[in-house]
Image (cartoon, grey):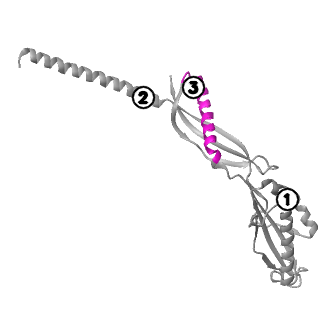
Amino acid sequence: MSNSEHSNATWLAAAILSLGLVIAALLLSHALLEFKRQDRYVTVKGLAEREVAADLAIWPITFTVNGDQLAELQAGLEQATGSITAFLKLHGFENDELTRSPPKITDFYAQTYGNQRPPQRFQALRTLTVQSSDVSAVRTAQEAAGDLLGEGIVLAQDYAYGTDAQFLFTGLNAIKPEMIAEATASAREAARQFANDSDSVVDGIRNANQGLFTISERDSNSPDVKIVRVVSTVQFYLGD
C-alpha cells in the first residue's frame, strides 16, 4: 500500500471513530435527559361523581297468619297472599314481577312447656317479593302499604329476605368510560396546579390506577337516588 493510500485509510478510520463518538455522546445525552424526565413526576388523585336514579327495586313484603288448625292456617295464608297480590296489581305490577316464598310454619305448642301456651298454636310467615324496574311505582306502593292493615294483614319482618326495599343502579358499565375520563381530567388539573407551583409543566402519564367505583345513597330519605363515585390515582411526568 502506498503512503497516499495508507494516509487516506487512516483518515477514514479516524472520521468513522469520530462520528461514532459523536453519535454515542448524543445517545448518552438523550438517555440522561430521558432518565431525568422519568425521575420527575407527581402523583395526584382525580374525582368523578354522578347523581343517578335507581333503575331496579326489590321490595320484600313479609306477613304472618295465625291459626289453631293447619287447614285454618292455610286458608288464612292464601287469603292474605291474594289481598297483597291484588294490592300490588292495583299499583301496576304484573305476575312476573312477584315472587312468593314458601311459608315458614311455627308450632308454638312445641316450643312451650307447662300450661303457658299462646292463644293460637300455629303461625305462618311468608314473604312476597316485588322486583321491578318501575322504581317510582314501588315507591308509591310503599307509601300506600298501610292500606293492607285495614284488610287485617299483619306485616312482619323476615331477616332472610331483608327488612327494607332495595333500590339498585345497574347501569354502571354505560357510564364508566365517561367517568374515568372525568377523573383523569380532574387529576390532570391537580397536576397542573402542582406544576405551576413548582415552575414545571405537565407531560404524559407515567402510571394510572382508575380506582374502585362506589354506589351509595344520596341521603337516607331518598334511597332511590344514588351517587356514583370513582377516585383515580394518576402519575404525571413533569418537564421544564
Pick the front one: 193 or 151: 151
What's drawn in magenta, residue-wise? 174-200
Label 3 sits on what residue type?
Ala
In three-dimensional space, the C-alpha distance between marks 1 and 2, rounded to whole angstroms, equals 65 Å
Which numbered dot is residue 24? none
Residue 114 rendering spot, x and y as whole percentages: 86, 85
Q: Name the residue tied to disc 1.
A: 141
Q: Name the residue tied to disc 3.
A: 195
Q: What element carries label 2?
A: helix
In three-dimensional space, the C-alpha distance between marks 3 and 2, rounded to whole angstroms, equals 19 Å
- Please report the residue visible at 91 percent of the width from the left and 66 percent of the height from the top: 149
Report if residue 195 lies within the magenta region.
Answer: yes
Q: Residues within 10 Å of mark 1 (few under 14, many from 20)?
A: some
Q: Is residue 93 left or right of residue 146?
A: left
Residue 31 rendering spot, x and y as whole percentages: 38, 28
Give residue 82's quadrant in the image.
bottom right
Label 1 sits on what residue type?
Ala
User: Is residue 74 depicted above or below 215 in this figure?
Assistant: below
Label 2 sits on what residue type?
Glu
Going by the picture, which residue comes out furthest to the top? 4
Residue 182 rendering spot, x and y as whole percentages: 63, 37
Give residue 177's quadrant in the image.
top right
